[in-house]
Amino acid sequence: MPKHRYFIRYFWLLELFRLKRNLSFEDIQAWFKRKDEQLQPDDRLFAGGYEKRTFQRDLKDLELLFGVEIRFSKRNRTYGLQQADSTLVMSQLLQNFELSQVLRLYPGAIRYLQPEFKPTKGLEHMPTILKALDEQLRISFDYAKYGDFQIQSREVSPLLLKEFKHRWYLLAHDGQADAYRVFALDRIKTLQLQEEPAHTPSHDFTRYFDDCFGIIKGVHEVEEVELEADTLQASYLESMPLHSSQIRLPELTASNPPRFLLRLRPEADFQMELMQFGSRIKVIRPEWLRLQLLNQHKAAVELLSNNPIKQT
């Protein structure tokens, strides 16, 4: 069997266990049968079914290659994930790989595919930073902020990597300032691994950005944001939520516009995201955020029309 098909199997397993928690082997076989039937007859992986010894071998490969543990529970006779978060990350990283392999099966279809040509920035620094994170070592680099030509030398303890809007960012502890900073990887130059041990934080930083829209954790505290959307935009918001905390509020009557509630820090990146929706989304609360967006829209109209408008 071609090697790339092993990875398709791994992705199918990761996808399944991301969707469901506890599964019998019969459930797994049924899933593979459905996935296999989506392929052309000559490309199918399991004409004779997904055998248990193949499944056991795949479980060992998943743990060895990706650090994903799927364990059998004798109590309820099902298989389940031991590290749900890591599996979700790996599943997302493998999605593009699966697509590339499917295109290998159907090469003529590539001319009908138009992906977003926005290359992710900063990937060249990943190996060094991941090594530093794994071995808990400091790193040093030269850094220039966006809009600032002044280059600064930094030595920091890396804590977390986060992707946002096709860019990777590093959360790190700056020992000189005794503060936590966020650095855009594509603004980093001359990155070097240091021998000094990294700063060990007193609390878990894997959830540092959970209450953020993106990577800004600035002047605003966490608060509830209520939005009103038109029917079309509401469908988009439900299919792709703005934030993990987003819920749809029940409508009092059928004529009420859809409303959504989020709990996050309404920083500048979140405000910019709301601005792009124009009249399709309205901020109900908090009042300060509604006025902030109102003034930003007025400023945009003034800029485009050269007609001064009084701010609220």
Image (cartoon, rainbow, N blue to C red):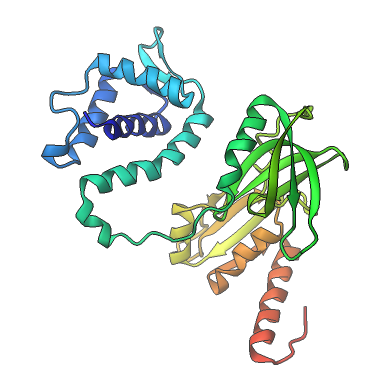
Above or below 156: residue 188: below
Q: How many marks are shown on the rendered structure? A: 0
- Residue at the image position 70 percent from the left and 39 percent from the top: 192
Rendered location of residue 13, percent (x, y): 35, 29
Rendered location of residue 284, percent (x, y): 65, 63
The quarter of the picture where residue 271 lies is bottom right
Visible residue check, residue 244: no
Rendered location of residue 210, percent (x, y): 65, 42
Kindly give the residue lying farthest to the right in the view shown: 177
The quarter of the picture where residue 126 lies is top right
Residue 41 relative to residue 81: left or right: left
Above or below 250: residue 296: below
Q: As rendered, which of 270 and 51 lies closer to the eye? A: 51
Kindly give the residue lying farthest to the top in the view shown: 74
Q: As rendered, which of 105 and 25 lies closer to the eye? A: 105
Locate the N terminus and report the quarter of the image it occupies: top left
- Residue at the image position 66 percent from the left and 37 percent from the top: 160
Visible residue check, residue 61: yes
Rendered location of residue 12, percent (x, y): 32, 33
Residue 225 relative to residue 58: left or right: right
Locate the C terminus and report the quarter of the image it occupies: bottom right
The quarter of the picture where residue 48 lies is top left
Q: As rendered, which of 53 and 220 lies closer to the eye? A: 53
Residue 72 relative to residue 158: left or right: left
